[in-house]
Amino acid sequence: MENTNRSLGQLFNLSFGFFGVQIAYALQSANISRIFATLGADPHQLSFFWVLPPLMGMIVQPLIGKYSDKTWTRLGRRKPYLLVGALIAVAVMVLLPNAGDFTFSQGLFLGLNAAMWFGLFSLMFLDTSINIAMQPFKMMVGDMVNEEQKGTAYAIQSALCNAGSVVGYVFPYFFAWIGISNLAPEGVIPDSVKWSFYIGAAILIACVLYTFFAVKEMDPQEYAKFHGIDPKAEKKEEDPGFVRLLIDAPSTFWTVGLVQFFCWSAFLFMWTYSNGAIASQCFGWDGLSTAVAEFQNAGDWVGIVFMVQAIGSLLWAMVLSPLEKLTGNKGAYAISLAVGAVGFISTMFVTNQYVLFVSYALIGAAWAAMLALPFTIFTNSLKGENMGYYLGLFNCTICLPQICAALVGGLVLKYFCSGEQVGMLVVAGVLLLVGAVAVFLIREKEEE
């Protein structure tokens, strides 16, 4: 790979649109359980609504990687996908929070009312579009940044990701604070949540347009020179297909993927059950109606503690670099996951909403490592060929564990946690501890 360094400004421009995409993702993560509970979902059903987002990511991201690898246009290689994904996301972000306002029949189909079905399909399109918009940022770093700067580039992307999360998480609380209603009739989403999605959509498209016009992607000749690829040999190669790529994948794909399985299962449980856990632990919610102040105020507070998690992640990201030098990538990874596990398990003993800041700040340490280290370790093991395709396949190590966790979440809640949603956060902590141990199975490039 050519050793041309890029300026910090260029590295920033590559990922700035990620700030807007992450606002959308944060709004989805913090509010989906709240939205579907408001529309009438039972707590034991909630995890099933979380199957669609990772399932769509698992389908979409490898395809985006595969086809964008072959897309060389005047507008760029990854950027056309970025723009299309953002435009679809904006449209869906306007529709999703209005699921409870449309006039639907009151009958049930497969146990769900029509508003929940509308919300479910909106969620499917929202996550599909977020995945289409999100993946090109990771690919552009892989395409255009050398190994020496890749850690810095992903750290900038992680910082922008966390900054976007802070904004997205705090929106519902902020809008309620300035006087927009936080309560609504049974089955209707409060205006504070609706305006959060509207403003988030506007910021998303503005940030994506900035990166679209500020970044000039390489043409095929520049790309081949940068990655040391023979362009003639590249043209003669046939599409290997995802099965062949998986067979030929470096061992880091599988070993980092194992760690990812435990980590992303843990965070799926956090996104699904934080609202109910905080409502019952700290706000005195009785678990019955969702059209009450205790539940909706807890929903706003979920955004605040998720914001604290993002700030904790930003702060821990500053610790990661010296920690990597001291303990290596694997040591820093394992320590970060263990710190996050302590944060998850501590929620079981917290009944004060402000003490939760400590728990979620510790969880942020795991999130910081999950955003930066897996991609640094994995992309350093790759050559330039099929970079996007491999990153799309690697995203399956994020999506598959979430699908598995979503499918079994209701059963774990019923049989292992006695219906207490805070117990699911303890389960998340245990999963992170297992992930921390699995880190030491990873073989990095220099070890192979």
Image: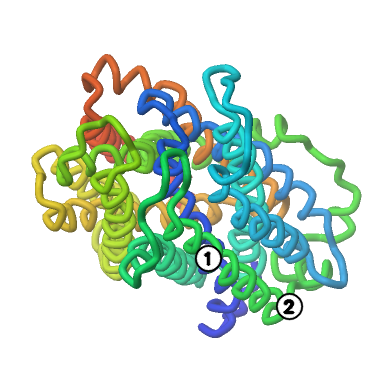
Q: Quadrant of residue 35?
A: top left
Q: Position of residue 212 (x, y in %)?
A: 70, 74
First in sequence: mark 1 vs mark 2: 1
Between 204 and 248, the residue placed more toward the observer is 204
Q: Secondary structure at mark 2?
A: loop
Picture residue at 72% right of the left edge, 32% below the top: 244
| Label drawn at residue 200 | 1
Colour scheme: rainbow
Q: Is residue 54 visible?
A: yes
Between 191 and 299, the residue placed more toward the observer is 191
Q: Position of residue 48 (x, y in %)?
A: 48, 27
Picture residue at 17% right of the left edge, 46% below the top: 283
| Distance Cα–Cα, label 1 vs label 2 | 26 Å
Seen as rendered, the residue at the extreme top is: 415
Q: Is residue 321 visible?
A: no
Picture residue at 72% right of the left edge, 35% below the top: 242
Q: Amino acid at mark 2?
A: Lys
Label total for image: 2
Q: Quadrant of residue 144?
A: bottom right
Relative to 95, is 112 on the left or the right?
A: left
Relative to 244, is 180 on the left or the right?
A: left
**Residue where numbered disc 2 is placed:** 216
Q: Quadrant of the N terminus?
A: bottom right
Q: Position of residue 26 (x, y in %)?
A: 45, 56
Q: Secondary structure at mark 1?
A: helix
Q: Position of residue 38 (x, y in %)?
A: 42, 39
Q: Amino acid at mark 1?
A: Gly
| Label drawn at residue 115 | none
